[in-house]
Image (cartoon, rainbow, N blue to C red):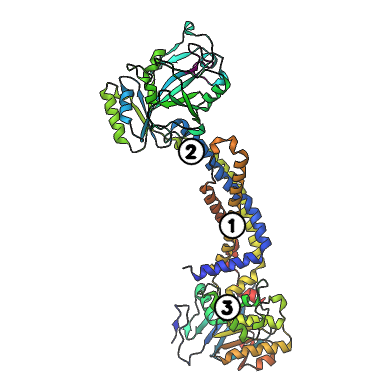
Amino acid sequence: MTQSFDQPTVQVQPAQAPLLQLTGITKVLKGQGEPRTILSGVDFTVHAGQSVAILGRSGSGKSTLLSLIGLFDKADEGQYLLHGNDITKLAERRAAALRSAEFGFVFQRFFLLKHLTAAQNVAMALVNGQGWSSRRKRKQQVEEALEQVGIAHLSKSKPSRLSGGEQQRVAIARALVRQPRIILADEPTGALDTETGNLVVEVLLNTTRQGCGLVLVTHDHDHARKMGRVMELRDGRFN
Amino acid sequence: MLSGKFRSAVVIGGQGIRARKLRTFLSMVSLFLGVLAVVAVQAGSEIAERAMLTNIELQAGKDGTIMGYVPGEKGAPGIVESTLKGRTDAVAMISSRAVIGEPGVRPVNEGGMPFEYAGRGGDYGGPMVYCDANGTCTEQKQQEKKPAGQAIEVGLVALTGDIRPFKPFRPVSGSWLEFGSTPSLAPRIVLNEEAAKGLNQYRVPGEMMVDGATHHMTPQILGVVTDGYSQPRAYMRLDELRTWMPSSVEPSEVDKFRGGGTSLELYLEPGTDDLQQLLKSKIVAAGVAQEQLHFQVVKSKENMESELRIMRLIFLGMAFMVLLIGVAGILNVGLATVGERVEEFALRRAVGMSRLLLAGIVLAETLLTGLLTAGLAIGTGVAGLHVALMMFGSRFPSLEGTTFPWEAGVAGVIAGLVAGVLGGLIPAIRAARIPIATVMRA
């Protein structure tokens, strides 16, 4: 039995309930040409502390699935349960609140704001209109997040002075600063060399040891093998 | 307490402005002239209005004052004088005529005309004419003319009390009449600027002849004021004038000696209905017809505002055109900035910011820009006025004591905010519509 969300804060269901559960998700791209089915009846579940890798060729629907999980977009069909609550048809304002409270996002292209320092980039996730904490508390949260990814000493550096790996770790700290329940990482190692990529994957995997769910979209089979579960998307369906 | 959303919008807006200082500066430059135009027009019209009002009030009386006209007959002046004695909420003015200088000669400005017309004969060049209260005018006979001499003619205004609360005469030099002291036998007079000009221009003996008075008097000139009249006038206490008048003649009836008539002007504070009623009752009881008494509220502001309204609207319209150019500048910069910040906005939404707040941030940036510009424009206006007053203030006495009108400051802030909203609205809507998924996948 499911219940719908009427508050942006999460009502945690009993331990056996998955963090998120998508059932029969279909997404059709309606552009100027013929409608194209990107995802077709996809089922997907992640439990607390579980890491899942999603493999697939370009255009297979990996990123689209991640967008639906991260509430960037809405599915055309199917059901989306978060902690057992139905959030399939969520208003934009509620979706924004859930993105802030539940999810941490890591992207291939770090998306750091070049005019802000590493600490300010991390703090950006705290200054998003979803509640307000004092400057002191924000500073403490940011320091902890940077510590967690091992770059606390670079807090005052601007992105232009950081290496790719360091920038990605700042982005991970930004994802972690609100202590999310699920990390969604879209090819986070795509722009990094193998060694740095491994380091980043290790940092992400560390979060699952604290009970966080991790969904990693990647092309790299080595990184995928480090995850607890590997799924492959092909033509909008999981094999 | 401010909400988290509002604080977030201000913090992020401030960061955005700091990150794009040059763009913010360019936006401000384009907006500055528009806001300054609004501030200047508003300040100019307020100052002009105050200056005009001051000038109008010099003659007509302060806005809201109750002004009354009472015929100077059947003992009315005496009734008015005794009723108003010791009161500060009402003053009566009784006009007469005085010649300062050699006795028995024709004054250089016969008829009390301004001195620039002196020597051109009565009525500014035509024959001297006197009119009575009913409007019947008679020409002064040729044989009445006296030989020319060293004397000037002034309109003499006798006062029952201090008129300045009702007519804001501006002091030029010396002091004003003191009504608390014992009446002096040497009447103390205060001249208006035209009378002072005449005394300065013509060397005349210090002797004053007042129509109806039995003896010549030696006046003490206390000071000079600006009273808004172009004819020479002198002001004195009624009780001091009365000392020199025969007991049978009312000071207000002296014009009858010249074949004319006169009236009393009364100035009463608003809310003195009881006093007005008392005066009317007494005067009517003395035999003056009710319909000869006229009381009205002075509406200096209303009359002047209608004159200024069209001018103000025209100038404000022009200022808003300039402001619109500034708005277009902000809009242009705002749209370009949103185009550049697509990723930032998508990212902010990805980390939990709502569309509404994102739009609020863009608006907050343009509003802050508008407010900063307004502050600069107001500061420039204040400094400009200060400099202008230092340079030209002495040439325009009505500008004396002028300060920057707060209305202009408010208009500037409103103009800055409106420009911020107009210039930021479309960029804000565009920012709110950025699709996160598309941008973050790119």
Identified by mark 3, the residue type is Lys
Q: Nearer the viewer, mark 3 or mark 1?
A: 3
Circles 2 and 3 on the same chain? no
* Residue B87 percent across, percent down from the top left: 34, 34
> Would residue A208 be counted in the magenta stretch?
no
Residue B134 makes an appearance in the image: no
Q: Which mark is residue B370?
A: 1
Q: Is residue B291 left or right of residue B332?
A: left
- Give the residue at mark 3: A139
Element assignment for label 1: helix
Residue A120 in view: yes
Residue located 61% across and 48% down the image? B383
Q: Amino acid at mark 1?
A: Gly
Give neighbour class at mark 2: few <14, some 14-19, many 20+ (Cα, 10 Å). Answer: some
- Contact between labelled residues 3 and 2, with CB atoms less than 8 Å apart: no
**Above or below for B126 versus A139:** above
Q: Residue B201, percent across and down? A: 58, 21
Q: Please give the residue where the numbered disc 2 appears in the rendered image.
A: B305
Label 3 to label 1: alpha-carbon separation: 31 Å
The magenta stretch is: B99-113
**Is B100 part of what is drawn in magenta?**
yes
User: Mark 3–mark 1 contact, CB under 8 Å?
Assistant: no
Image x and y of residue A225, in percent: 66, 94
Q: Nearer the viewer, residue B175 or B263?
A: B175
Q: Residue furthest left?
A: B285
